[in-house]
Image (cartoon, rainbow, N blue to C red):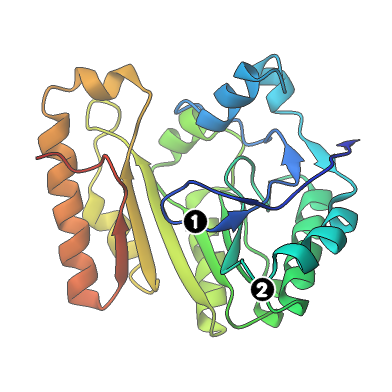
């Protein structure tokens, strides 16, 4: 795996459900095609040139050394650190990334810092041995493998993601699910109830609409559709004692 060096790692994110975050990989082998906002921003700022280059991730090999310097300066400001917003901490096919992610979480936990994790890969059961305050999540915008093949071509299959998350839940960990970016029926016809039922064990559900895809806005009823979906998530979570967050821009007046 190719590697790069950086000068800094931890930063305050503007994402609505985030605090501090880090991205210890440039690129992502999962190759999502929603399209991927992180890839387009990386292309815009000259970090990568092509989709193919984005799909050949580069590990920041001096991540732990950077954290040694940054944690003492920032730890009193940090509520939690999220892994990751522009890459995947448990990227399929890259053991080096997973190993680094676990070492990052350990280092942050050892300094009294809670971590939040989100992946389209497989959450390793080894995470259950780390801080009980950590929160582990998966992205799950569908249960249909044809959707995954088209939009998340190199990610882990949906049922394996769910099973890994359930294993951490059964081990006593806080688990969450990001049902995002959720597609309109002209992209795929599916039942949101089925997705919700498949993760009814989770402690929290985040729901958000698909953006940056012309097919969404071409669907004439997209505003009503996402309003109805959000209402369904809220009702389901209320009935099952699950916390929830509806992403900004998902619901329309």
User: Residue 137: percent from the left, percent from the top?
Assistant: 51, 61
User: Residue 249: percent from the left, percent from the top?
Assistant: 26, 39
The number of callouts visible is 2
Identify the secondary structure beneath mark 1: loop
Q: Residue at x 44, y 65 (%)?
A: 176
Q: Residue at x 42, y 50 (%)?
A: 140
Q: Left or right of 29: which side holds 202? A: left
Frontmost residue, 55 versus 197: 55
Identify the secondary structure beneath mark 2: loop
Residue behind mark 1: 18
Residue 214, compared with residue 236, is above or below; it is: above
Frontmost residue, 74 versus 227: 74
Q: Left or right of 22: which side holds 218? A: left
Mark before the other along the chain sequence, 1 or 2: 1
Specify the quadrant that holds the C terminus: top left
Residue 190, compared with residue 44, is above or below; it is: below
Frontmost residue, 99 versus 153: 99
Residue 47, compared with residue 14, is above or below; it is: above
Frontmost residue, 74 versus 249: 74
Q: CA distance from mark 1 to mark 2?
A: 14 Å
Local crowd size for mark 2, using a 10 Å CA cut-off: few (<14), some (14–19), many (≥20) = many
Q: Left or right of 163: which side holds 103? A: right
User: Residue 201: percent from the left, percent from the top?
Assistant: 38, 74
Contact (Cβ within 8 Å) of mark 1 with mark 2: no
- Is residue 130 something that shows in the picture? yes
- Quadrant of the rendered image containing residue 118: bottom right
Residue behind mark 2: 113
Residue 99, compared with residue 183, is above or below; it is: below
Question: Which dot marks residue 145?
Answer: none
Q: Residue at x 60, y 30 (%)?
A: 31
């Amino acid at each position: 795996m190719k590697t790069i060096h950086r000068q800094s790692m931890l930063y305050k994110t503007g994402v609505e459900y985030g605090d501090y975050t880090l991205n210890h990989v440039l690129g992502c082998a999962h190759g999502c095609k929603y399209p991927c906002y992180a890839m387009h921003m990386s292309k815009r700022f000259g970090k990568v040139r092509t989709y193919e280059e984005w799909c050949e991730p580069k590990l920041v090999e001096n991540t732990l050394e950077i954290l040694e310097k940054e944690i003492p300066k920032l730890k009193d400001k940090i509520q939690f650190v999220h892994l990751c917003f522009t890459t995947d901490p448990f990227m399929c096919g890259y053991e080096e990334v997973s190993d680094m992610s676990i070492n990052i979480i350990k280092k942050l936990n050892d300094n009294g810092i809670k971590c939040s994790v989100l992946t389209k890969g497989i959450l390793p059961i080894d995470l259950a041995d780390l801080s009980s305050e950590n929160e582990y999540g998966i992205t799950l915008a569908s249960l249909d493998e044809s959707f995954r093949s088209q939009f998340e071509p190199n990610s882990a299959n949906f049922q394996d993601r769910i099973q890994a998350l359930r294993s951490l839940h059964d081990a006593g960990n806080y688990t969450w699910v990001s049902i995002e970016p959720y597609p309109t029926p002209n992209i795929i016809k599916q039942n949101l109830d089925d997705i919700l039922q498949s993760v009814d064990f989770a402690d929290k559900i985040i729901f958000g609409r698909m953006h940056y895809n012309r097919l969404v806005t071409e669907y004439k009823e997209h505003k009503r559709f996402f309003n109805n979906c959000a209402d369904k998530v809220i009702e389901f979570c209320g009935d099952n004692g699950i916390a929830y967050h509806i992403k900004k821009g998902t619901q329309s007046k």
